Image (tube, grey):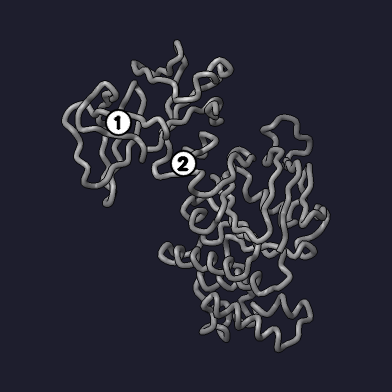
């Protein structure tokens, strides 16, 4: 297992990159601590697979360096880095048995036959592959083949890290949860550094202790699932995490208040002193649908919103409102009744965020 450190790392597929948009990865510094379970989360094209391939050695970065336990590995191959990588589609040797697939990397190391058998049987039991050890890999289901791919990395004692590049893409939906839990159990049992690339926030939250959210070739926030949900430090994190994502309302500052349409809101506590420095920047108020409060009757503390749509999702409902010419969504319990006519709403101050050019504005202490 290894600590993986990225220093001033950047990568471009262009021969002579000039502008920031020429880079698939913009300059970043990051540390994956030894033995951690991490997810790299983001939409297609954000740079997460590029970053994973740089860590594994399949790709050489244009700039910066990759360090394993403080040692520069830019010039080392994946084999020399002792990296195991599991891809979207299972990579197995179809003509070999499951046992031989799992034993392959150990035999290449010259490990004794009795030790090979011990290691293979141990990993096969963890991955629930024992009943199919003697079967040819071509006769396996897609999820069994993917477990074999995972097993080839887990079976090695010398592996520095295991990298997963959207490994559950081909797995049936009802099996994905089981395999995610299995990976989590394996990590807890073997304490291996694991980095899991996905565009699925549920996969990331189920697997990882900490998640790095990527957007536009950068890691815009690194934190626990709870931190990403409750305090997104970038507007994209608010939008991308959650179902539905954070409400982001374009506002302007006027006379010490924030306005949109015909709505005027007081500046969130601790932020009034920040407003002069934000002049000319794009301002957005953010609040998650879970924290938008709907009241039974209007008061001096509520705003009047128009009901546009109600979506019943079984255990909860998503209510779409119009307020000040902007759409606002609220997430309500299934049995919550809505008042007649205009809907009285409020935005609790502790959950109201202000973003300037997409970056969270921190309140004065």
Q: Quadrant of residue 42?
A: top right
Q: Position of residue 200 (x, y in %)?
A: 49, 51
Q: Residue furthest left?
A: 340
Vertical order, 307 against 122 (above or below): above
Q: Position of residue 93 (x, y in %)?
A: 64, 75
Vertical order, 177 against 19 (above or below): below
Q: Which secondary structure lies at badge 1?
A: strand
Cβ atoms at labels 2 and 1 below 8 Å apart: no
Question: Which mark is first along the chain, 1 or 2?
Answer: 2
Vertical order, 192 against 349 (above or below): below
Q: Which mark is residue 230?
A: 2
| Disc 2 residue crowd, few under 14, some 14–19, many 20+, Cα 10 Å | some
| Disc 1 residue crowd, few under 14, some 14–19, many 20+, Cα 10 Å | many
Q: Residue furthest front?
A: 365
Q: Which residue is mark 1?
A: 321
Residue at 75% in and 61% down: 78
Q: Which secondary structure lies at badge 2?
A: helix
């Amino acid at each position: 297992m290894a600590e993986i450190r990225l220093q001033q790392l950047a990568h471009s597929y262009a021969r002579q990159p000039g502008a920031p948009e020429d880079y698939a990865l913009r300059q970043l510094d990051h540390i994956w601590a030894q033995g951690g379970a991490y997810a790299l989360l983001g939409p297609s094209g954000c740079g997460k697979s590029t970053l994973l391939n740089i860590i594994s050695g399949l790709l050489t970065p244009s700039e910066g360096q990759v360090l394993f336990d403080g040692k520069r590995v830019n010039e080392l191959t994946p084999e020399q880095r002792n990296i195991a990588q599991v891809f979207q589609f299972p990579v197995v040797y179809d003509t070999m048995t499951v046992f031989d697939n799992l034993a392959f990397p150990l035999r290449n190391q010259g490990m004794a036959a009795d030790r090979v058998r011990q290691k293979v049987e141990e990993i096969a039991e963890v991955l629930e592959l024992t009943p199919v050890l003697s079967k040819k890999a071509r006769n396996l289901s897609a999820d069994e083949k993917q477990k074999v791919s995972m097993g080839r990395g887990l079976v090695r004692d010398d592996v520095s890290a295991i990298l997963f590049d959207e490994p559950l893409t081909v797995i049936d939906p009802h099996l994905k949860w089981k395999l995610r839990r299995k990976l989590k159990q394996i990590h807890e049992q073997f304490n291996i550094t694991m980095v899991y690339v996905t565009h699925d926030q549920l996969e990331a939250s189920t697997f990882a202790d900490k998640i790095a959210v990527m957007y536009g070739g950068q890691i815009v926030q690194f934190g626990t699932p709870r931190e990403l949900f409750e305090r997104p430090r970038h507007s994209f994190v608010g939008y991308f995490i959650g179902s539905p994502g954070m409400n982001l309302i374009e506002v302007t500052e006027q006379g010490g208040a924030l306005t949109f349409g015909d709505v005027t809101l007081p500046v969130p506590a601790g932020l009034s002193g920040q407003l002069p420095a934000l002049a000319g920047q794009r301002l957005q108020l953010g609040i998650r649908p879970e924290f938008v409060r709907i009241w039974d009757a209007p008061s001096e503390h509520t705003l009047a919103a128009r009901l546009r749509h109600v979506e019943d999702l079984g255990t909860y409902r998503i209510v779409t409102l119009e307020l000040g010419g902007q759409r606002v969504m609220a997430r309500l319990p299934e049995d919550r009744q809505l008042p007649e006519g205009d809907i009285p709403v409020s935005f609790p101050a502790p959950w109201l965020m202000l973003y300037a050019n997409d970056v969270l504005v921190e309140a004065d202490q």
